[in-house]
Amino acid sequence: MTWFLFAIAIVLVTLGVFGLIRQRNPINTMMCVLLIVNASILVLVTLDRIRSVIDGRFIALAIMVLTAILFHFGLGSILRIYRDKQMADIDEFKGMPD
């Protein structure tokens, strides 16, 4: 069963890295980063399950909370930049609006 969870984590990391390389949209980029973070959480919880210690689950919960907070701040910043400058490409971004 644990090999299946590791395989899912590998697929998630692969999809995330492929999306980071392929997509230039900031929202898609954030979603790909979230895929990679979720894969790392899955590996952490799987290793915790193998060792039968509950510490990894608390660390995974803390990572999930911090990731959600950072994602909301990042999404707000991206939406503000898009609203002010009307651009949806990372390569065109030069700085925060005044």
Image: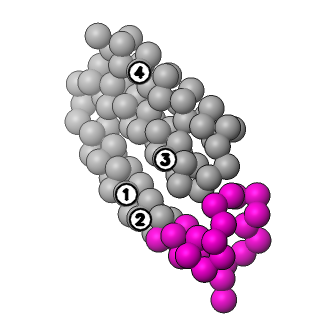
User: Do the CB atoms of the residues marked 3 and 2 lie less than 8 Å apart?
Assistant: no
The location of residue 91, given as percent across then percent down, is: 76, 58
> What crowding class fits label 4: few (fewer than 14 Cα within 10 Å), some (14-19), or many (20 or more)?
some
Secondary structure of residue under mark 2: helix
Closer to the camera in the image, 10 or 78? 78
Mark 4: which amino acid?
A: Ile
Q: Which residues are magenta?
A: 76-98
Secondary structure of residue under mark 1: helix
Mark 3: which amino acid?
A: Met
Give the residue furthest to the bottom: 98
Mark 2: which amino acid?
A: His
Residue with the mark numbered 1: 68
Q: Which mark is residue 8?
A: 4
Q: Which sits earlier in the primary sequence, circle 3 or circle 2?
A: 3
Q: Which sits earlier in the primary sequence, circle 3 or circle 4?
A: 4
The answer to whether residue 84 is magenta is yes
User: Do the CB atoms of the residues marked 3 and 4 lie less than 8 Å apart?
Assistant: no
